[in-house]
Image (spheres, helix red, strand yellow):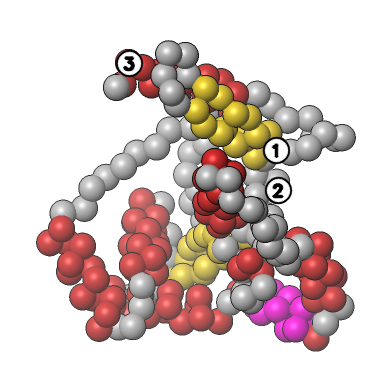
Amino acid sequence: NDRNEAPLQSGAAQAAQEPFNLIDRPLFRFSMFATRGKNRSGILAVVHHLVTDGWTMEMIIPEIVNTYRKLLAGENVIEEKSPSYLEYLDIEQLYLSSEQFEKDKQYWHNVLTPFPTGQRFKAPSRPIEGIRCAQSIHRVPHRTTEKIAEFCRKRSTSPFKLVLAAFYVYLSRAASLKDVLLQSASHNRSTPIMRRMAGMFVSTFWLRLSREGALPFSELVQRVHDQLGDI
């Protein structure tokens, strides 16, 4: 029950807050634990974001669980060789001297020039320190999600792109701006081999949106769709 789980959750949270030594120590910690008086045990994984991303954790956690279950059952565990992150670093080095790099560089120069100017949101009165954060969850009614899905199906786009377009509308109205730069994240795994690699791949990209006059929301979503297709 919740009372029995509370010490476990507290201990896990405390372990997650312990900082890493970034200089000469591993950027991950794996611990096994067992609860007193209960025939329960588990594994706690604490991994720095410098060496992992959500995609990686979705790969390695099931692998750890499956390996553990095989060991309990007395089965042989055969290690499957996966592509190394070092291969990705080699690919990146080749990219930096490629023709595609020059094309991409010119593309982003065109997108970001001239850099937009205008009103900015007020910064916090006091600097925010530490790594603590909060999460706010808002549930969308089922009928609304069905309408969103239907809207996206008709335009061969995704809810993610619709949300980006809606976020632009909010920012442009809140800050009285027509030209807005949005920054979002990408899993950055463009090949099947990269999708099998463990490591930090997440990258960010810019999305520039502007409006002149009355622009239908459906057309704004199409602009987002087209820009993301170019990246």
Quadrant where the image shows the C terminus: bottom right
* Numbered tag placed on residue 28 in the rendering: 1
For image coordinates 65% across by 34% down, the residue present is 30
Which amino acid lies under the numbered mark 2 shown in the image of this protein?
Val
- The secondary element bearing badge 3 is classed as helix
Q: Residues within 10 Å of mark 3 (few under 14, many from 20)?
A: few
Quadrant where the image shows the N terminus: top left
Question: Residue 183 falls in which quadrant of the image?
Answer: bottom right
Q: Is residue 184 left or right of residue 216?
A: right
Q: From this viewpoint, is residue 120 visible?
A: yes
Q: Mark 3 and mark 1: span between their CA atoms?
A: 29 Å
Q: Is residue 75 left or right of residue 219?
A: right
Which amino acid lies under the numbered mark 1 shown in the image of this protein?
Phe
Question: Residue 157 falls in which quadrant of the image?
Answer: bottom left
Which amino acid lies under the numbered mark 3 shown in the image of this protein?
Arg
**Residue where numbered disc 2 is placed:** 51
Which mark is first along the chain, 1 or 2?
A: 1
For image coordinates 77% across by 78% down, the residue present is 101
Q: Position of residue 228 (x, y in %)?
A: 50, 75
In this view of the protein, which residue sits in the foreground, 8 or 41? 41
Q: Residues within 10 Å of mark 1 (few under 14, many from 20)?
A: some
Q: Mark 2 and mark 1: span between their CA atoms?
A: 8 Å
Q: Residue furthest front?
A: 74
Query: What segment is highlighted magenta in the picture?
Result: 100-110
